[in-house]
Image: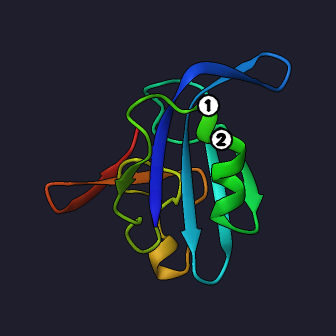
């Protein structure tokens, strides 16, 4: 399950960054992750936190999210980044030969380089 939300006001994170939106990602096996984004338009997160359960995420963040509330989105495709809002993966990860410095995205049914 994945849900994201925009914050009412940016929340400071680290010495210079502000968090504008968050994403909750819950897996049956690995637990709950909260991804934090330093731009309202960010595709990938800048920070993440681990939680033992979603109730703790809601307790920490529900008062901070705006009137749109939590917005559900599809889980990531296989081998794709869990925090990305678009299909995004490390090239070669699906074959067991990841090229860590190269990303690709799915466009019109084809994986293409991601800038």
Tag 2 residue: 61
Give the left or right position of residue 110, taking residue 43 as reference.
left
- SS at badge 2: helix
Q: Residue 87's image quarter? A: bottom left
22 vs 67: above or below:
below
Q: Residue at x 52, y 42 (%)?
A: 44
Q: Which mark is residue 64?
A: 1
Q: Which mark is residue 109?
A: none
Q: Residue at x 83, y 26 (%)?
A: 14
Q: Can you give x and y, in whole percent of width and height, for residue 78 in the image? A: 41, 74
97 vs 100: above or below:
below
Q: Can you give x and y, in whole percent of width and height, for residue 85 in the image? A: 40, 47
- SS at badge 1: helix
Q: Alpha-carbon neighbours of circle 2 within 10 Å: few (<14), some, or many (≥20)? A: some
Q: Quadrant of the C terminus?
A: top left
3 or 106, nearer to the observer = 3
Q: Are marks 2 and 1 in contact (CB under 8 Å)?
A: yes
80 vs 6: above or below:
below
37 or 3, nearer to the observer = 3
Q: Residue 76's image quarter? A: bottom left
Q: Residue at x 48, y 28 (%)?
A: 66
């Amino acid at each position: 399950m994945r849900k994201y939300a925009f914050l009412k006001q940016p929340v400071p994170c680290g010495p210079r960054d502000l968090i504008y939106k968050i994403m909750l990602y819950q897996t049956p096996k690995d637990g709950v992750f909260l991804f934090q984004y330093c731009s309202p338009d960010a595709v990938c997160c800048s920070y993440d936190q681990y939680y033992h359960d979603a109730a703790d995420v809601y307790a920490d963040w529900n008062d901070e999210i705006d009137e749109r509330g939590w917005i559900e989105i599809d889980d990531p495709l296989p081998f794709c980044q869990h925090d990305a809002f678009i299909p995004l993966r490390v090239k070669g990860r699906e074959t067991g030969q990841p090229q860590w410095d190269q990303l690709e995205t799915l466009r019109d049914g084809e994986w293409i380089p991601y800038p």
